[in-house]
Image: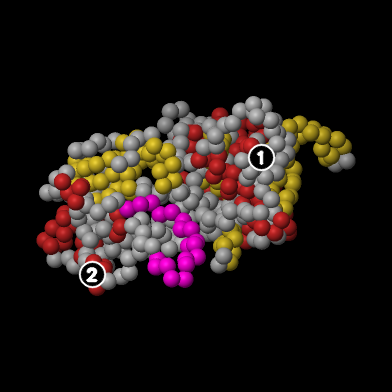
Amino acid sequence: MPIPILMPALSPTMEEGTLAKWHVKEGDTVASGDVIAEIETDKATMEVEAVDEGTVGRILISEGTENVKVNETIAMILEEGEDAGALDAAPAPPLAPVPSSPPAPAEPDAPPAPSARPVTNGAALGSAPVSAAVAPTAGAASEASRIFASPLAKRIAGQEGLDLAALTGSGPHGRIIKRDVLSALANPAPARGPQAAATGEPKAQAPTSEGGLSVPGTAPASELGYAEGSYTLVKADGMRKTIARRLTEAKIAIPHYYLTIECELDALLAVRKDLNARSPEGEGAFKISVNDFLIRASALALKRVPAANASWSADGILEHHSADIAVAVAIDGGLITPVIRQAETKGLATLANEAKSLAKRARERKLAPEEYQGGTFSISNLGMFGIKTFTAVINPPHSMIMAVGAGEQRPVIRDGAVAAATVMSVTLSCDHRVVDGALGAEFLRHFKGFIEDPMTLML
């Protein structure tokens, strides 16, 4: 039976994407792991690999198509021994799940109208559709007991004496493929299919107007009171829509408060200059920025105050075991926050090179989802634009974000006399559900200590 290729969900919050490019054409032979297409999401361009092998029988969505729903069928693969005629005999491709509408009240004596289109039962996007018209039958029970596996997977399992019933498939609709069989043979325990990611961002409820809450910008342009012709309408792309939705939800749902502290930078700037002068030529070269000091100081401060390295969840407060620092990077059309994992374990030179690589690939929209999802703390630095101080909106699921202003010469009092120093203001936005005022202040105290005595960052 032909195998459908579905529009993948490349992140926990992805609902649709653009099919940017096909790397195959109808009639091409593909194997598991071959790159077959490129998908553009709101944050990155990702390659899609084939999960089974066969021949591309039909491409259903042409490249360049926008707003392709997750789980919509984009192509069909013919298995070994099948020809194009199998496509016409195959069942209709599965439809992308869409939210079902509440049923309209039926007349008392009116029989329910049958529907040929599957609809969802209100489950989350990505769940299998169920038919609203057909009740389960004995034949359905027989179909449920059938083992769905590719011919190659069946052949390998038969040769090795492996019971396919003990496996969970990772192919489309739970189909057992070659990779699942090989994994089971390499592991004495029964192979398990991939589980739904438990670390994805929880999707907050969209803000509404209930209880008198009004969300600006939810009305169409024609109702905002501007004269026609007095503006140019620029359509918001997927990234801008995602930023608008998530930050609106964050500002409404998260109880923000703000703490500002000033840090003297002269000692840090002297250490930075000395370290950069020691950089080797060629391989192993580095150029440390002030931002790299901020990343390391934040990570070490989080380890000193582990209760602040936490996130709010429906199950309780999640205290994280490592300091995964997300750094805001401006890109065309918005921003993205690539994450430096376990930043507390990395030296300044390593942080500098990793941050530079992530920022470059972020601007090229080539980050993998695991490189910008998650994280435990955010840094947003506008100092390079001359901004003295600002406040940032918390980036869920983080409980804190630090807004960094420019370092500038300011008067300070030392031993009762006025002196000049390079001073930087940082403002910490905190989620009061997780980080109380004293806890946020303790974090900033440690952060300031690391910044003003940069030699401690080397320990």
**Residue extent of the magenta highlight:** 94-112
Determine the residue located farthest toward the bottom in the rendered image: 138
Question: Disc 1 marks which amino acid?
Answer: Glu
Q: Is residue 334 above or below residue 54?
A: above
In this rendering, position of residue 446 left or right of residue 177: right
Residue 328 lies in the magenta stretch: no
Q: Is residue 133 above or below residue 96?
A: below
Q: Secondary structure at mark 1?
A: helix
Q: Residues within 10 Å of mark 1 (few under 14, many from 20)?
A: few
Residue depicted at x 74% and y 43%: 262
Q: Quadrant of residue 62?
A: top left
Asked whether 306 or 257 is in front, the reply is: 257
Instruction: Name the residue that disc number 1 marks.
Output: 223
Residue depicted at x 55% and y 42%: 241
Q: Quadrant of residue 44?
A: top left
Residue depicted at x 65% and y 29%: 228
Q: How far apart are the alpha carbons under marks 1 and 2?
A: 54 Å
Residue 158 visible from this viewpoint: yes
